[in-house]
Image (spheres, helix red, strand yellow):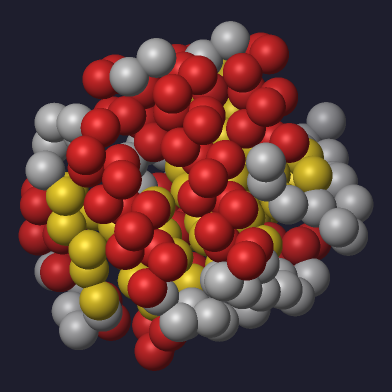
Amino acid sequence: MELGVPKLDEFLGEISEGSVVLIETLGDLGEEIIIEALKENKEKSVAFVTKRLKEELGRIPELKNMKYIVFGEDFAPQELFKITYKLRQILNGYLVGLFFLQPLLVFHPPETVYKFFSEVSSITHDNRLVLIAILDKRLIDGKTLAMFENASTHVIEIVEELEKFRVIRGIRIKKSPKGSSGFYELIIKDGKVTIGEPLG
């Protein structure tokens, strides 16, 4: 399976069934990568979203008919159980976009969210799905972040730096079966993701 972002696909290689792709980012930056992946694999994609996000994604023509599993905004413990239950029902070979690790970290301690993510990763592996999730790395400490990375087969890291009054966004492969990479410029324009030149 590929994500639909050419240079990123080149770095990652074919993503096999049972893989967990974690995007470590700042805020929602990089959500576009998940959207590109869902568009690229729209025939076999499912997104776990909030009602608000479903409305936003539904405006994207390629994602209008995609399967959405919608959850409330409060993320009570029974909601987490429902997510794992629904995940077990998805057929193998499907791409699953998980958009709400950030809000979970607002409502639950990092250890609870990690346990949930670990269980989701295990289901992904056992059911031969491909999971792609986004996580704001500022919401957890380094030790907890390392635990999330350990539960993932692929880790993509996004950073932002100020250089001569200009914000530069960088992206790198931090972990994958194919190896890691240095930082490259990340360009997001009109919802389109492009990987530019190496940063250094």
Say which residue appears at 16% left-offset and 50% top-offset.
71
Q: Is residue 194 above or below residue 134?
A: below
Residue 139 found in image quarter: top left
Residue 95's spot in the image, x, y percent?
48, 72
Residue 146 locus on image (x, y percent): 71, 24
**Residue at 31% in and 45% down:** 81
178 with respect to 116 (left or right): right
Q: Nearer the viewer, residue 103 or 13?
A: 103
Which residue: 22% across, 63% down? Answer: 69
Q: Is residue 186 above or below residue 166?
A: below
Task: Tell me if residue 75 can be seen.
Answer: yes
Camera-side residue: 28 or 73?
Answer: 73
Q: Quadrant of the N terminus?
A: bottom right
Residue 91: where, in percent of width, then height?
45, 82
- Would residue 198 be visible to someone looking at this image? no
- Location of residue 56 (image quadrant): bottom left
Judged from this view, the residue extending furthest toward the right is 179
Quadrant for the C terminus, please.
Answer: top right
Q: Position of residue 10 (x, y in %)?
A: 77, 69
